[in-house]
Image: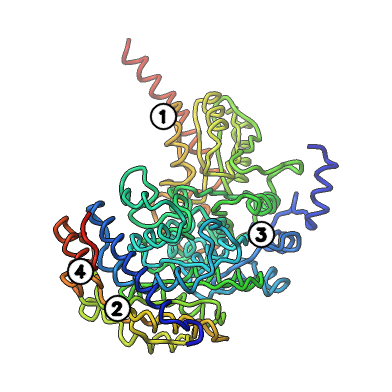
Amino acid sequence: MGSREQNTDNKSRGTDFSGQAVATRDAYGTALLELGRRNERVVVLDADLSGSTKTAKFAKAFPKRFFNMGIAEQDLVGTAGGLALTGKIPFASTFAVFETGRAWEQVRQTLCYSDLNVKLVATHAGITVGEDGASHQALEDIALMRVIPNMTVIVPADGFETQQVIDKVADYGHPVYVRLGRAKVPAVMPPDYKFQIGKAHTFNLGIDVNIIATGVMVSEALKARDILLREGIDAGVINMATIKPLDTDAVLEAARKAKLIITAEEHSIIGGLGGAIAEFLSEAHPVPVRRIGTEDVFGCSGAPGELLKLFGLTAEDITKAVKGFFQERTESLAYKNFASQ
Amino acid sequence: MAAVTQSRSIDFLTQQAKRVRVEILKMLTEAGSGHTGGSLSAVDIATALYFYKMKHRPREPEWPERDRFILSKGHAAPLLYTILALTGYFNESLLTGLRKIGCPLQGHPSSKLLQGVEVSTGSLGQGLSIANGIALGLKLDKNPARVYCLLGDGETQEGQVWEAAMSAGHYMLDNLCAIVDANELQIDGRCADVMKIEPIAGKWKAFNWHVFEIDGHNMEEIVNVLDEAEKLKGKPSLILAKTVKSKGVSFFEGKAEYHGITPTKDELEKALEELGVHGE
């Protein structure tokens, strides 16, 4: 993947988000608009949140291909399914809580059971929704979507990756859930990065610990790695953008190489990325796993950055978990040695 | 009406409806489980659609200009399967496999497994949104095809139905015709006792639909109203078809308990006799 090819891609795409700190929802709005220009089959539906989900950009440019369904998420999902049946590529957007929760059974019955070509691109996922509080902070959506057959689940880490995800899922003829955030996130993916559905991106592998992260937690994982390296712990980081289908080869390689696997996500530790990796590794290659995420609790109001700290979703929380693990291990080894004497 | 000039056409459709009833009863008896009442109540409507009104090509099920039929009340799967078999989408011999392992005729319709099924249904309340989406897509493509969606009256207790009713009115989907099979019964009893849905016609009118009320077993009325609905512009059409649950089998008619119960062998024989068919 030479830089020339990359440049050509970016030119045809229009905007290039590589290296830019943007909210993934903003990258979505731009990517969707540019996709709409290239592909007439793309239609967009929203449930009265087009300003927040950023589908309003598409709506303004292509009013005939945009359908506001009002505050009615079940109908939003069902109508998107019907449009897919006529050969359209519907992108249906609203907040993650409502799209995956309120309309869960429509996603299961109408979209996934019939394997319809609908893209559910939800914004305002996770704790970084911030001030709106628990009612609007989806911490269960990955679990809810992951459990349904035929569904693909993708969580981009930054604007650059989001842009590529949107282009890729448009060409993939099955239901997809894309999880985006409200808050601005740092750019983490390298400029020559090419997103592929079901392929993890390995930044590096460590021999002590490998951190498998998704979404905003990728940047925290990278910070944690640097702290750990400075303290003499060899750490690696993997961006697991596609949670389903899980890139089991990448997980296995990471687990074989290191003594500990850390998962990190802005989601409940139940059923999300951590759940998926624990399920896989417990059967395929049992190694110690520690899950960083919210601890089976609802969120609350506050500034996004403060909430990440409050709910234990920072680089420091990752390093603490890693150091805690190695300390416990040393202590228990010492105890064993003592006891066996 | 001009469209059905010869009474022979009505006779023909009535004959087809009888064939459909016979096959439904046979397949349900063979399967030993399934929804008898709500399949039989909608036979005349579905027969008029597939044998008269809809443009469709059984040998070319993906024909882009076909009219679409969405069975929102997916539990009436035996009705859909029978009609699809009798119109030539697949071999009639498949009908005996209903609800058995390995047979594409699932308890509720699965579009991934069976030709002619537009979309999987079975969870009530979801079909009308899908029909709306298809109607919007067809309009975008300037495709003249129409969309028909069959709902149960009990089904309209689902909130999503009213979200979809609102959308169809808002988007003025005049290429859409929804039919409510108003047999007045649901599993737990009379709709009026379980959860009152009257006034049905008034509700749909309030959501900006053209509303027609007909006898859902009078073939001439059904045919005429389907022709009439097609001509109306600017609004979706709702046909409120008054029906009788288990219509055609006197000893099952109007009984809520036959919602999800199948005939015994003896009952089948009696039923076929009533329909003028002798057991084989």
Question: In the rendered image of this protein, does residue B19 appear above or below residue B5?
Answer: above
Q: What chain letter is assigned to the residue under label 2?
A: B
Give neighbour class at mark 2: few <14, some 14-19, many 20+ (Cα, 10 Å).
many
Q: What chain letter is assigned to the residue under label 4?
A: B
Tell me the residue that label 2 is attached to: B243
Q: CA distance from mark 1 to mark 3?
A: 36 Å
Tell me the residue that label 4 is attached to: B274
Asked if disc 1 and disc 2 are in contact, CB closer than 8 Å, the reply is no
Whole-percent x and y of residue A15? 78, 57
Are callouts 1 and 3 both on one chain?
A: yes
Tell me the residue that label 3 is attached to: A28
Whole-percent x and y of residue A91? 60, 62
Looking at the picture, which amino acid does disc 1 mark? Glu
Are callouts 1 and 4 both on one chain?
A: no
Q: Dividing the picture into quarters, in which one does residue B194 lie?
A: bottom left
Task: Please tell me which residue lies in front, B33 or B223.
Answer: B223
Q: Looking at the image, which residue sits at the far top?
A: A341
Task: Please tell me which residue lies in front, A36 or B147.
Answer: B147
Q: Nearer the viewer, mark 2 or mark 4?
A: 4
Q: CA distance from mark 2 to mark 4?
A: 19 Å
Tell me the residue that label 1 is attached to: A283
Find numbered disc 4 in the image and state the secondary structure of the residue it sits on: helix
Are callouts 2 and 4 both on one chain?
A: yes
From the viewer's perspective, tell me whether residue B174 is left or right of residue A29: left
Give neighbour class at mark 4: few <14, some 14-19, many 20+ (Cα, 10 Å).
few
Residue drawn at (74%, 53%), measured in percent from left and top?
A17
